[in-house]
Image: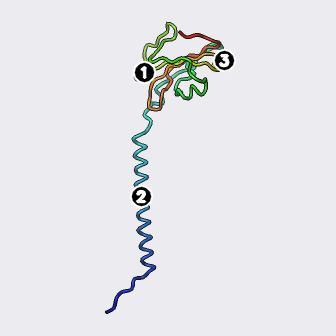
Amino acid sequence: MFLPVSDPTRATRHQWQHRLSFFAALFLIAGFTAGLWHLVNIDTDDPNEFQTVVVGTRGASFGECVKQTQREIELRYGRTKNEWEGYRPLGGCSRKELPTGRIKTLVLSGRGGFDNAEGTVMVWLVKRQRGWVCFDSAWFSGNVLFP
């Protein structure tokens, strides 16, 4: 009887084809999974949700921090001095419309305004997917006390 002899180069080539097919399939599955994860976890915050025009003088500025996150604001002005849950109006001025969601009010000290002078800033933040985002702010030069 004659037994067929297997070709070693053919067997090796066949093994490499299987390995290559396996890694190609693995790569496609990983890419598909990453793309699907990205679609599900896209930041749904509307970048145009908070619109403002920065208005001010040498002693006061309004709207400087709008669209910034709490982290960005604290990197600029330092640690928060006071924090309140909810919207806390500035003096007798209260907004007519507030954004939906959890709101908090912060007071910080640091440089700001047109002259980058030392002062106090009050910011109003709303909870969004990317964190606490400023929807309004007021900066006053000097050491202004906010009740």
Q: Earlier in the sequence, mark 1 or mark 3?
A: 1
| Front-most of residues 94 and 102 | 102
Classify 57 as above or below 44. Answer: above
Task: State the image coordinates of residue 115 (x, y, percent, origin top left).
Answer: 68, 19
Task: State the image coordinates of residue 123 (x, y, percent, origin top left).
Answer: 53, 19
Residue for badge 2: 26
| Label disc, if present, on residue 118 of the rendered structure | 3
Q: Residues within 10 Å of mark 2 (few under 14, many from 20)?
A: few
What amino acid does circle 3 point to? Answer: Glu
Rendering quarter of residue 39: top left
Dot 2: what SS?
helix
Rendering quarter of residue 2: bottom left
Dot 3: what SS?
strand
| Label disc, if present, on residue 99 of the rendered structure | 1
Residue sitting at x 57%, y 25%:
74
Residue sitting at x 48%, y 26%:
132
Q: Residue furthest left?
A: 1
Q: Quadrant of the N terminus?
A: bottom left
Residue sitting at x 63%, y 16%:
119
Q: Residues within 10 Å of mark 1 (few under 14, many from 20)?
A: few
Number of on-image labels: 3
Dot 1: what SS?
loop
